[in-house]
């Protein structure tokens, strides 16, 4: 029982419960796909254009097509954990969940529309990389010069990770239909803008709520720090007063 409380207490202490929940769902997807529940995986997947099943624009990240995607899901979980460490604690768990879901929906809509303009029909979307790429672009635009260890080995600035991620969307989906790759990459511009301006109230993306939360926390910490400084100053003055009083008393006794 204690180990369970320690586990969930540690997750809360890291301020990334949504990240852990998403990783847990990816793990469950992977385990379920090992059980060959093809019907469930197909039900969660987005079948372009998906108009008869609009909910699949949010569920396709948790659909795994089969053994060919197992390694991809493992890397997706590791990558999501890295981005969650950087972002969720800052913008808040609710905003982070909204960002992930918006990334899934907006990117899928862009790719589907782009593909349809080039005559792509009947495509099936699954896997979490579209929303993870959106989250990555937000991180890259907020912390462009932050150095990370890519896959724990290669030191690289986040801005280049963002460009690399956008390039993967362009070439992967562009290999199927060029317009789909271009549309998906262009849609990442929305997430770049959120990364730059989000939290200032400039965009209606729960940025103002996140900013208000951060400001309140900053004000509270500043007030606590000021009060602590004032308390320590008063304690120091009291010690000095008592010291002078003691020294004065000692001098009077010596004179006598």
Image: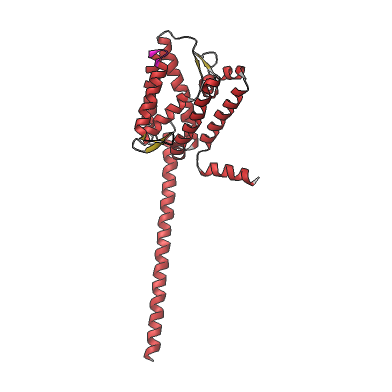
Q: Residue at x 41, y 71 (%)?
A: 239
In this view, the residue farthest toward the bottom is 256
Most foreground residue, 174 or 190: 174
Q: Quadrant of residue 45?
A: top right
The residue stretch that appears in magenta: 174-178
The magenta stretch spans residue 175:
yes
Q: Relative to 44, does residue 81 appear above or below in the rendering?
A: below
Query: Is 69 situated left or right of 159 in this image?
Result: right
Q: Position of residue 241 (x, y in %)?
A: 39, 74
* Colouring used for the render: secondary structure
Query: Is 36 situated left or right of 158 in this image?
Result: right
Most foreground residue, 59 or 197: 59
The magenta stretch spans residue 65:
no
Q: Residue at x 45, y 15 (%)?
A: 112
Q: Residue at x 49, y 27 (%)?
A: 101
Most foreground residue, 170 or 227: 170
Q: Residue at x 43, y 30 (%)?
A: 135
On the rendered image, what quadrant is the C terminus found in?
A: bottom left
Determine if residue 204 is in view.
Answer: no
In this view, the residue farthest toward the front is 153
Q: Relative to 152, does residue 251 appear above or below in the rendering?
A: below
Q: Quadrant of residue 176?
A: top left
Magenta span: chief secondary structure: loop
Q: Position of residue 173 (x, y in %)?
A: 42, 17
Q: Position of residue 1 (x, y in %)?
A: 66, 45
């Amino acid at each position: 029982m204690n180990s369970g409380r320690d586990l969930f207490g540690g997750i809360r202490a890291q301020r990334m419960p949504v990240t852990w929940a998403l990783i847990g769902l990816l793990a469950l997807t992977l385990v379920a796909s090992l059980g060959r529940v093809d019907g469930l995986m197909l039900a969660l997947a987005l079948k372009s254009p998906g108009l008869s099943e609009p909910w699949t624009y949010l569920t396709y990240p948790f659909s795994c097509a089969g053994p060919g995607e197992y390694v991809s899901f493992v890397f997706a979980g590791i990558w999501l954990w890295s981005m969650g460490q950087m972002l969720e604690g800052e913008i808040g768990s609710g905003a982070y969940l909204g960002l992930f879901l918006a990334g899934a929906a907006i990117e899928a809509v862009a790719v589907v529309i782009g593909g349809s303009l080039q005559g792509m029909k009947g495509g099936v979307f699954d896997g979490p990389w579209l929303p993870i790429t959106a989250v990555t672009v937000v991180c890259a635009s907020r912390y462009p010069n932050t150095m990370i260890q890519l896959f724990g080995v290669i030191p690289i600035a986040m801005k280049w990770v963002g460009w690399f991620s956008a390039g993967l969307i362009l070439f992967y989906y562009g290999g199927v239909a060029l317009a789909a790759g271009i549309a998906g990459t262009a849609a990442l511009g929305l997430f770049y803008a959120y990364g730059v301006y989000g939290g200032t109230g400039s965009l209606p993306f729960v940025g103002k709520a996140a900013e208000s939360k951060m400001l309140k926390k900053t004000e509270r910490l500043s007030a606590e720090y000021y009060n602590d400084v004032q308390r320590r100053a008063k304690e120091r003055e009291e010690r000095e007063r008592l010291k002078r009083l003691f020294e004065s008393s000692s001098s009077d006794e010596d004179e006598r």
